[in-house]
Image (spheres, rainbow, N blue to C red):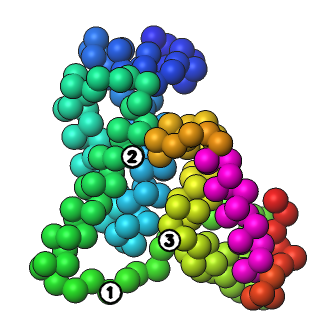
Amino acid sequence: MNVAELQDAEDAELIIAVLAGQNRAFDELFNRYQRAMLTVAQQIVRNPADAEDIVQDAFLLAFEALPQLDNLNRFGAWLHSITRNRALRYMKRASRIQLHEDEDDELQIPAEQNSTDPAIILVKESTHEAIRDTIDSLPSDFQEVIKLYYWVDMPQKRIADFLSLPLTTVKWRLHKAKDMLKTLLEKRGYGDILSF
């Protein structure tokens, strides 16, 4: 498979290619799911560096266990499960070793125009922080969907596959999350910044 074919291939086709020894196909799967997995891991461990380690570990486990995957069309949901379980296991182990202080969730917010004006930079930073804090105050099911959709740019169908949910549930959660987010931001005085 060439690069264009890899990018257009369904997950099941890529898995078959990986099992046939084409490691570039697994690279495409990694590129396709890495940001979504980071979102899931960061939501649990709250530390970007630890989340990256968990994602690497989850992909390694997935690569090794790929021949045992029964339903190739459920790869995204399977990968989500592996990532979530690795992150939960990490938190359980870490809580036994020492108490961790929560660190700020460093999500990647889409970049806007660069400006060197300190006032504009401060306004943008406080706005981004308000949005992050407001999203973090949503129930976890809604947080997950809105982060995957807006920050990972994952299509709704892929979110449904990744979270092992019906597409209608993903659409409903996304709609409900937007409504809750608007309401909360309006209460906090940031109602004019969203344009869903």
The total number of labels drawn is 3
From which residue to which does the magenta span run?
169-185
Place of residue 167 in the rendered image (x, y in percent of width and height, measured from the top left): 61, 39
Q: Amino acid at mark 1?
A: Glu
Marks 2 and 1 close (CB-CB < 8 Å): no
Q: Quadrant of the N terminus?
A: top left
Tell me which amino acid carries mark 2.
His
Q: Are marks 1 and 3 in contact (CB under 8 Å)?
A: no
- Image quadrant in which you'd find residue 43: bottom left
Place of residue 195 in the rendered image (x, y in percent of width and height, measured from the top left): 84, 63
Task: Read off the residue under disc 2.
Answer: 80
Q: Which mark is residue 101?
A: 1
Secondary element type, mark 3: loop
Disc 1 residue crowd, few under 14, some 14–19, many 20+, Cα 10 Å: few
Any part of residue 107 in sight: no
In the image, 46: left or right of 122?
A: left
In the rendered image, which quarter contains the C terminus?
bottom right
**Of 177 and 135, which appears nearest the observer?**
177
CA separation, marks 3 and 2? 20 Å
